[in-house]
């Protein structure tokens, strides 16, 4: 009985750790892409998306730590195991998203004041499309792991990667409006909308 339980616990731990590693790798890849595109375009919506990905990276690292810690077997100090670490991780993620939203909103207001156009829109749009494809692949994998393990921490991670899909779509719309329809306030206004949406979420 004990052996079967330990095997199940170990399997659950290995699955959640793999899912958390996939999140960390995806976020690191997207940070590199979006840093390049944000620098080239000057887009606030993209900068907001980059900031969000940066926080996703930190949150995913936290998730990785928490699921590895939660997978540790019970010991003298933790007679019922280490599962509470997952719930703590989910709580810290909420705080990270809130900070992210406030920063994005502030940057968008600054950009609204200077009225600068977005440059090299093709970089912003291309990178956002790649980001959407990578995020979608990660979400499908996470959904499978959540179904099999019921992990709270992976579910927390899953929720804000869902938000990233909308975020990347919003960046594309903002850049299109700003550069091709010459609606100069579109990009920073979308930046503000992204910030509000994150806070609401």
Image (cartoon, helix red, strand yellow):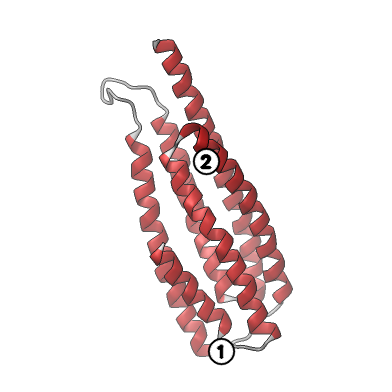
> Is there a contact, CB below 8 Å, between mark 2 and mark 1?
no
Q: Residue at x 43, y 17 (%)?
A: 6
Q: Is residue 47 above or below residue 161?
A: below
Task: Name the spot of residue 31 as percent of width and height, x first.
Answer: 59, 58
Q: Quadrant of residue 34?
A: bottom right
Q: Is residue 182 left or right of residue 13?
A: right
Q: Residue at x 43, y 42 (%)?
A: 153
Residue 22's disc is none
Q: Is residue 162 above or below residue 111?
A: above
Query: Looking at the rendering, in which quadrant would you find the C terminus?
Result: bottom left
Q: Is residue 84 left or right of residue 181?
A: left
Task: Name the spot of residue 137 as percent of width and height, x first.
Answer: 64, 48
Q: Nearer the viewer, residue 104 or 162?
A: 162
Q: Is residue 29 left or right of residue 191?
A: right
Q: What residue is shown with label 2?
A: 20
Badge 1 element: loop
Q: Residue at x 38, y 47 (%)?
A: 90
* Mark found first going from the N terminus, 2 or 1: 2
Crowdedness of circle 2 by 10 Å Cα count: few (<14), some, many (20+)? many
Q: Quadrant of residue 177?
A: bottom right
Q: Residue at x 71, y 77 (%)?
A: 120
Task: Name the spot of residue 17 as percent of width and height, x first.
Answer: 51, 34
Query: Looking at the rendering, in which quadrant would you find the N terminus?
Result: top left
Residue 52 visible in the snapshot: yes
Total number of numbered discs in the rendering = 2
Q: CA distance from mark 2 to mark 1?
A: 40 Å
């Amino acid at each position: 009985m004990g052996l079967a339980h330990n095997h199940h616990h170990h399997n659950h731990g290995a699955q959640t750790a793999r899912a958390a590693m996939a999140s960390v790798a995806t976020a690191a890849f997207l940070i590199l892409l979006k840093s390049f595109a944000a620098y080239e375009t000057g887009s606030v919506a993209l900068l907001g998306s980059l900031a969000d990905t940066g926080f996703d990276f930190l949150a995913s690292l936290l998730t990785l730590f928490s699921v590895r810690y939660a997978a540790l077997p019970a010991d003298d100090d933790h007679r019922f195991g280490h599962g509470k670490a997952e719930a703590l991780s989910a709580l810290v993620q909420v705080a990270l998203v809130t900070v992210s939203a406030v920063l994005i909103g502030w940057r968008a207001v600054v950009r609204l004041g200077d009225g600068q156009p977005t440059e090299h829109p093709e970089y912003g749009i291309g990178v956002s499309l790649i980001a959407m494809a990578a995020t979608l692949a990660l979400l499908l994998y996470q959904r499978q792991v959540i179904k099999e393990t019921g992990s709270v921490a992976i579910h927390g991670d899953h929720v804000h990667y869902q938000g990233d899909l909308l975020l990347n779509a919003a960046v594309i719309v903002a850049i299109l409006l700003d550069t091709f329809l010459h609606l100069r306030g579109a990009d920073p206004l979308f930046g503000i909308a992204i910030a509000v949406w994150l806070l609401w979420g």
